Amino acid sequence: MVKRTRGMRGGHSRNQLSKHREKTTVTSLLKQFEVGAKVIVDMDSSIHDAMPHPRFQGKHATVVSIEGKDTYAVEIKDGNKKKILKVNVAHLKAE
């Protein structure tokens, strides 16, 4: 038998990424952060563009640079390593 493939949202993060009665507002898409600002990765499951991996849900990060009009490069410490993620502004909130 062939093993069933699972993607990033396949089973384990179903409850974590489900939205219950929350709506994406225009103000959440128009937020702006400056370089060096402290943010929290809070994924919005209704917007799939530049969504980080579910393991980074709820992590604290620092904005490193602005990539385009609505994407930010944020730095997260994962164990002893520093990782840089490209995240849409809808998946970030101020700390």
Image (tube, rainbow, N blue to C red):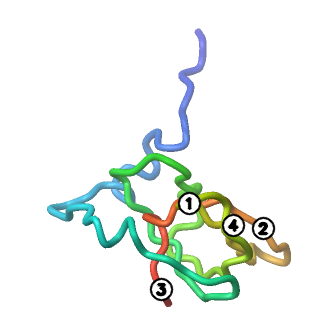
Between the residue at mark 2 and the residue at mark 3, the CA separation in whole angstroms equals: 19 Å
Residue pictured at 67% horizontal, 61% vertical? 67
Q: Which residue is mark 4?
A: 73
The x, y position of residue 10, in whole percent, is 47, 39
What residue does disc 3 label? 94
Q: Residue at x 35, y 70 (%)?
A: 28
Q: Amino acid at mark 4?
A: Ala
Is residue 30 shown above or below 17? below
Q: Residues within 10 Å of mark 4 (few under 14, many from 20)?
A: some
Of 70 and 51, which appears nearest the observer? 70
SS label for mark 1: loop
Please name the residue shown 69% across and 87% down the image.
36
Residue contact at pointers 2 and 3, CB within 8 angstroms: no
Which of these two is toward me, 84 or 64? Answer: 64
Q: Amino acid at mark 3?
A: Ala
Relative to 50, 80 lies left or right: right
Looking at marks 4 and 2 on the same chain, the residue that comes earlier in the sequence is marked by 4
Count neighbours of disc 2 (C-alpha within 10 A) and say few if under 14, some if 14 to 19, many if 20 or more: few
Question: In the picture provided, is 46 more to the left or to the right than 20?
Answer: right
Q: Is residue 29 shown above or below 49?
A: below
- In front: mark 4 or mark 2? 4
Q: Amino acid at mark 2?
A: Lys
> Which of the 4 image quadrants contains residue 90?
bottom left
Name the secondary structure under disc 2.
strand
Where, quadrant-wise, is the N terminus in this rendering?
Answer: top right
Residue 31's quadrant in the figure?
bottom left
Query: 19 left or right of 70?
Result: left
Residue identified by numbered label 1: 69
Q: Nearer the viewer, mark 1 or mark 2?
A: 1
- How far, Cα to Cα, is label 1 from label 2? 22 Å
- Please give the residue where the numbered disc 2 appears in the rendered image: 83
